[in-house]
Image (spheres, grey):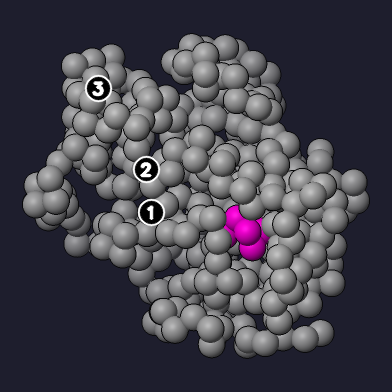
Amino acid sequence: MEVSAQPHTGTRADTNLSMADLSSSTQEPISQYLQSRSGWIKRLLYYLVRPLLHRCTRRYLSREMLSLARLHWVLPERGFPIETRRRWPAKYLSLKPKVILVLGTGSGWDTLTWASHRPNRMLAVEKYLFERHWQTVSSYARRLGLVTPDFLQADLGRLPVRSESVDLVVSDAVFEHCQDMPAVAREISRILSPGGIAYASYGPMWYCFGGDHFSGRGGLEQGYNHICLTNQEYRAYQETYETSHEDAQSGLRYSQLELFSKHTTREYLEIYASAGLEVADLILEVSREAVEFRQKWPGRFVSLLEAHPQLTADDLLVKGNLVILRKKSSGVVGRMRGGIDAC
């Protein structure tokens, strides 16, 4: 099996990859994995009430947003637990995925949640280094008899993976941080095998309440500070509410590194289409805090729209997207790049 980059060391093509291990400044991955799990009673309850949640939540969005192609559910921030999300892609795969690639794996805990698919191989790519956490996850997977992930440090817009070699590409809470989302989408299209699909959930969206992963500290009225304050006012706000134990994956660090894509739902869909990907299924999540903000301060909500005329009210309310993507029959695959042969 050909490999152009050693695990944990990144690729030579990207000189901006951080070589500092961030494990000490983030939560332990096994505790994250255990905390993410839901009991079967909770999952059953969500299954039963999901249609009601959909009917109650969709009323906050416009007819135009509700007419998006392949839109299946409109939900609050709860109602689609992680086990349900992990089973969701199976509806669109004709065979069990032999190779799964996790984009933006961070500490690596999410690789354990995909083990139920029983792939032959699992790749996990992350721009930043979490070496100690990756070793912990690998050891834990071996103890449970699960596939051991191959962790790679690389730019998500230049994946060291051969074209058409991955059956299932998955990602949670990553796309909102991709500074070059079109490049990431093109890479997904390139590496997907015929019949392969991609799953992604992402949010909070930049223009929604708390879209910078920081605004909202200090109260509901602070939720849109990232798009309504001047740069000087925003820095002062961050200094006021910065804590002494900011996580390496916190909103403060994301702001300092400008790790935001700043796209709306429609812009993401346009990016996928341009990359040769089509949406097979779509779920929108509406922010409870955003709805409450609009109800409490309708004038301020209108002012936000006036200050950003390119936006709609939907863009201020939709917190997250969950999508299933597949290649268009005539989608662009792109040139083959040397790297891991995932087959």
Q: Earlier in the sequence, mark 1 or mark 3?
A: 1
**Labels 2 & 1 near each other (Cβ < 8 A):** yes
Reading the image, the residue beneath label 2 is 206
Q: Quadrant of residue 222?
A: top left
Residue 12 to residue 52: above or below: below
The answer to whether residue 99 is left or right of residue 242 is right
Q: Which residue is mark 3?
A: 301
Q: Is residue 217 left or right of residue 80?
A: left
Observer-nearest of 250 and 63:
63
Q: Is residue 234 left or right of residue 30?
A: left
Q: Position of residue 75 (x, y in %)?
A: 54, 25
Query: Is residue 220 visible in the rendered structure shown here?
Result: no
Q: Picture coordinates of residue 58 (x, y %)?
A: 52, 16
Percent from the top left, x then y, of residue 335? 72, 71
Q: Amino acid at mark 1?
A: Phe
Q: Are marks 1 and 3 in contact (CB under 8 Å)?
A: no
**The C terminus appears in which quarter of the rendering?**
bottom right
